[in-house]
């Protein structure tokens, strides 16, 4: 089904804290960028999958090898944890992949507001502006449709436009919060003007207003400032944002300018948003001394829980958990170790994509 079916449809993109059928995760293999630390990566992704399934989420795992991935997960769940029941909520699908960042190539869910029918929008993915190989990742959603996992009647082919899930934040009511550095970057859609990009976002995803964030950058971020590394919309007109940290931190000025711009934004009713500060993790560096883009804003919200990355920094890890618990009072906040994930430039939210109910051919 092509993107033109969206013309004339009244639609909206659901907020992350709404209903979900499953969470999609990609399992690393030796030929990804995880190659040199594959064992560590496999362990960390397994612990993420376990955390999701233990608290009741259905998990769709896409993997290069279904057999070996299922064998590994089964042995780990049974021998390491002694928990077979949680494994029943995990489904493994064999699909070739380049890498593991499903947030940016997974399907984006929209809902027809007149009929309630959901659709899975498949946008193009070019490795964050042709920085990394992405030919297989760009085909994942189409393959899910071809093999009957995504309902063919609910699949929208929008691959003529490059768009990553990590660049979008919505309240589910028509507001989009995003960064101009990413969405207007010529390494994504060079033939579109800013006005045309805004129009396309309104047309295909149903946004009625766009809040363009022009400031905010964390060194080590390969995504050109994805919004999910900086700040997040939350219920009750709350925006959680990454603290600017110490004044001598290289990202202090940009994050402080970001906070000031967030304070200028208004809700659809014309009121200021309630700003809630998340701590900035202590600097984490790779083996070559380069800073990694660690942030607590890279959390995942599900109907039961909020899964927040932890970085082995007890004080700040606890502060992030406490802050999110104050905002999401009805959900359990679950910290998940992401020290290995951050070595390749992403974290928890980058590694997951929530899937709205009803887009699958059969229930998982």
Image (cartoon, grey):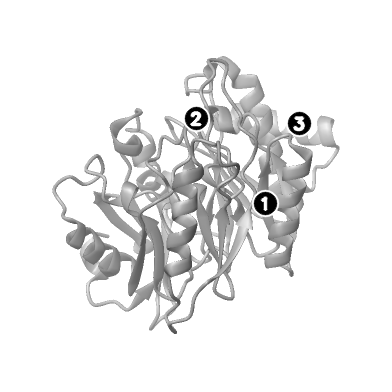
Examine the rendering and report whether any part of residue 207 can be seen: no
Viewer-proximal residue, 31 or 206? 206
Which x, y percent locates residue 230?
50, 50
Viewer-proximal residue, 345 or 293? 293
Cα separation between marks 2 and 3: 18 Å
Height in image: 180 above or below 78?
below
Q: Nearer the viewer, mark 1 or mark 2?
A: 1
Q: Which mark is residue 76?
A: 3
Q: Is residue 323 left or right of residue 38?
A: right
Q: Is residue 279 left or right of residue 11?
A: right
Q: Nearer the viewer, mark 1 or mark 3?
A: 1
Ranked by sequence position, the earlier of labels 1 and 2 is 2
Q: Is residue 63 left or right of residue 180?
A: right
Examine the rendering and report whether any part of residue 329 can be seen: yes
Q: Which mark is residue 64?
A: 2
The quadrant the N terminus occupies is bottom left
């Amino acid at each position: 089904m092509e993107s033109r079916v969206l013309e004339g449809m009244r639609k909206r993109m659901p907020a992350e804290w709404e209903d979900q059928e499953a969470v999609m995760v990609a399992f690393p293999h030796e030929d990804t960028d995880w190659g040199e630390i594959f064992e560590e990566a496999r362990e960390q992704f397994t612990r993420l999958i376990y955390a999701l399934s233990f608290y009741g989420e259905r998990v769709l795992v896409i993997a290069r090898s279904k057999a070996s991935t299922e064998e590994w997960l089964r042995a780990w769940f049974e021998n390491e944890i002694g928990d077979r029941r949680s494994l029943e909520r995990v489904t493994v699908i064999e699909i070739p992949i380049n890498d593991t960042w499903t947030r940016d190539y997974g399907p984006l869910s929209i809902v027809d507001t007149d009929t309630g029918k959901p659709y899975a929008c498949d946008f193009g993915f070019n490795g964050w502006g042709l920085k990394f190989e992405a030919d297989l990742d760009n085909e994942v959603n189409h393959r899910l449709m071809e093999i009957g996992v995504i309902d063919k009647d609910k699949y929208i082919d929008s691959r003529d436009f490059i768009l990553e899930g990590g660049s979008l934040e919505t309240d589910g009511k028509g507001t989009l919060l995003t960064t101009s550095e990413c969405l207007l970057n010529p390494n994504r859609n060079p033939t579109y003007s800013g006005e045309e990009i805004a129009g396309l976002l309104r047309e295909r995803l149903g946004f009625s207003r766009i809040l363009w964030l022009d400031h905010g950058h964390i060194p080590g971020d390969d995504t050109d400032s994805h919004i999910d590394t900086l700040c997040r919309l939350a219920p009750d007109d709350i925006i959680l944002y990454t603290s600017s940290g110490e004044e001598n931190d290289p990202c202090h000025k940009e994050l402080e300018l970001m906070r000031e711009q967030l304070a200028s934004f208004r809700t659809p009713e014309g009121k200021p948003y309630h700003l809630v500060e998340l701590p900035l993790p202590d600097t984490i560096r790779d083996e070559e001394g380069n800073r990694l883009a660690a942030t607590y804003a890279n959390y995942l919200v599900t109907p039961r829980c909020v899964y927040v990355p932890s970085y082995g920094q007890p004080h700040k890890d606890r502060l992030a958990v406490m802050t999110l618990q104050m905002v999401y009072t009805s959900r359990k906040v679950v910290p998940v170790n992401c020290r290995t994930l951050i070595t390749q430039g992403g974290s928890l939210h980058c590694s997951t994509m929530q899937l709205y109910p009803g887009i699958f051919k059969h229930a998982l």
